[in-house]
Amino acid sequence: MSDSDTGAGTPPTAAPERVSGETAVRPEAVSGGAALPAEALRIAAGYAFAGPALDLGALLWDGRCLPDARIRIPLPMLNRHGLVAGATGTGKTKTLQLIAEQLSAQGVPVFLADVKGDMSGISAPGLPQEKVRARAQEVHQAWTPAGCPAEFLALGGLGHGIPVRATVTSFGPVLLSKVLQLNQTQEQSLGLIFHYADQKGLELFDLKDLRAVVAFLGSDEGKQELKGIGGLSTATAGVILRSLTAFEAQGMSPFFGEPEFDTGELLRTAPDGRGLVSVLELPEVQDRPQLFSTFLMWMLADLFHDLPEVGDVDRPKLVFFFDEAHLLFTGASKAFLESVTQTVRLIRSKGVGVFFVTQTPKDVPADVLAQLGNRVQHALRAFTPDDQKALKATVKTFPNSGYDLEEVLTALGIGEAVVTVMSEKGAPTPVAVTRLRAPGSLMGPLDAADLDRAVRESSLYGRYAQAVDRESAYEKLTAREAARERAAGEAVPSSPPPGKAPATKGRPKEETSVVGQVVASGVFKSLARSVGTQIGREITRSLFGTARRRR
């Protein structure tokens, strides 16, 4: 291939010219060669942003790569959310890596969920392989190997990373119902259980705390306490307890407890001003998709609760990549989907951008998809009737363009994508078939020893590595049961002397109930006093029923 074909030796870029008050791009400024078709010029002009932007790659038109027609995303528009989609093996992971390392360089923190375990290399410089050099030459990229400052996390400490845990109280009933696969009635009952625990100061730190509260409220004594706010049937309590038991039997206990991970850690920058890339390592739990996808939603909801409103900002405070997004929506209740939609819609004003990563746009509900202004669509397959339907549906989600997108989307090569983003004015840019740039960081996993070393040297390791088990609902209810048994023993009357009837003056018509004895006990009064001193008079919950963090 000649220099003229690859774009090597391109003359300096010409300045834009003014046409009817708008900025137009001259042919030689785009191609470095012969004049381009008007449609290609129009596309290139749509990405000629004046402010800071991330470089995705170069325009492809009529089989040619136009290296000086740069396809970019304006930095302030990254909190308009986005979608990275495409069939397996088309280059989605490398696209995430490319965007993440540029965000980091611009001082924007990034969160990445690493399901396959091949994103840890973002912290190390890339290798100057022949394919990388060839791609860089094609798109006129001044490629230099460079890693990003990174933090490695792991759900419950399973795998290589700082343990990420959530308390059951913080996780809330809606998200927990999803991972327990409860139906709508059972989800509502679980919400009632959380409400009771919140009111009574029963901290639900781990799963044994929740199991203790469910068992108590399913008992005769517990049912009396729920009469005023709705009951919990024995059958529903049994289903929830069985679901919890099965959940724990699958090894899920380590994900719930203390110390709870503070999602504010995701907003940090490195000493040199670059954004920190937080990589959640998920290979050890990739066989538990309902759990890790819902945990990601908890992290996003927790951020939503805590962050202040900032409106439009010149750069996002965080960009959150939600990998394997289809798992989040599979089997989700209506309430859950509504909460996801509302979170995505509102978190933009808090400076957070969310990118969903999946295979096709149809994996994302329409109400959520409508919020995703930035689109990078890799190749799709059309081998089956269902594939063909998905392809047609995907094409309909793009603006009108000069491309035959049904043909283009099945013919894209690895590292090529159809792109449309939000312009600086908030309007969709023209659809652009793009040859993507090569990431500067290592495209593959770190060595396990290097990964473990990075985890141990982290400033977060001492804070989160060791699990703790404070007094909470389980211990309080156990003490309460012991007090009840003591009170019941003390309530047994002694036999009156022979021939003398027991005194009746002042005695109520009925014996004091066991519940009344427990309520009158010192342990119960102490428990009641704890309300307001330990977790507030009642925990404030939002959207998913998740608890607002108390810092």
Image (cartoon, helix red, strand yellow):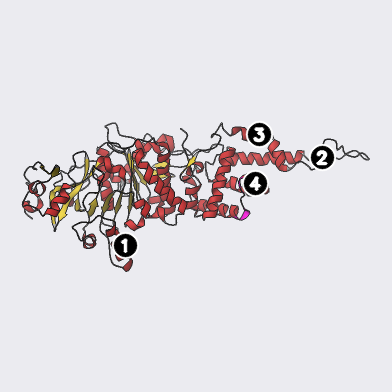
How far apart are labels 1 and 3 at the CA level?
A: 61 Å
Per the image, the residue denoted by label 2 is: 493
Q: Tell me the amino acid under the disc marked 4.
A: Lys
Q: Position of residue 165 (x, y in %)?
A: 45, 42
Per the image, the residue denoted by label 1 is: 390
Horizontal side of residue 304 vs 502, given as left or right: left
Q: Tell me the amino acid under the disc marked 1.
A: Ala
Q: Residues within 10 Å of mark 4 (few under 14, many from 20)?
A: few
Q: Where is 271 relative to 6, above or below? A: above
Q: Magenta part of the protein: which range?
A: 229-235
Per the image, the residue denoted by label 3 is: 525
**Mark 4 element type:** helix
How far apart are labels 2 and 4 at the CA level?
A: 30 Å
Q: Position of residue 495 (x, y in %)?
A: 86, 40
Q: Is residue 415 visible?
A: no
How far apart are labels 2 and 1 at the CA level?
A: 76 Å
Give the mark, 2 or 3, whose residue is nearer the N terminus.
2
Per the image, the residue denoted by label 4 is: 227
Q: Is residue 524 visible?
A: yes
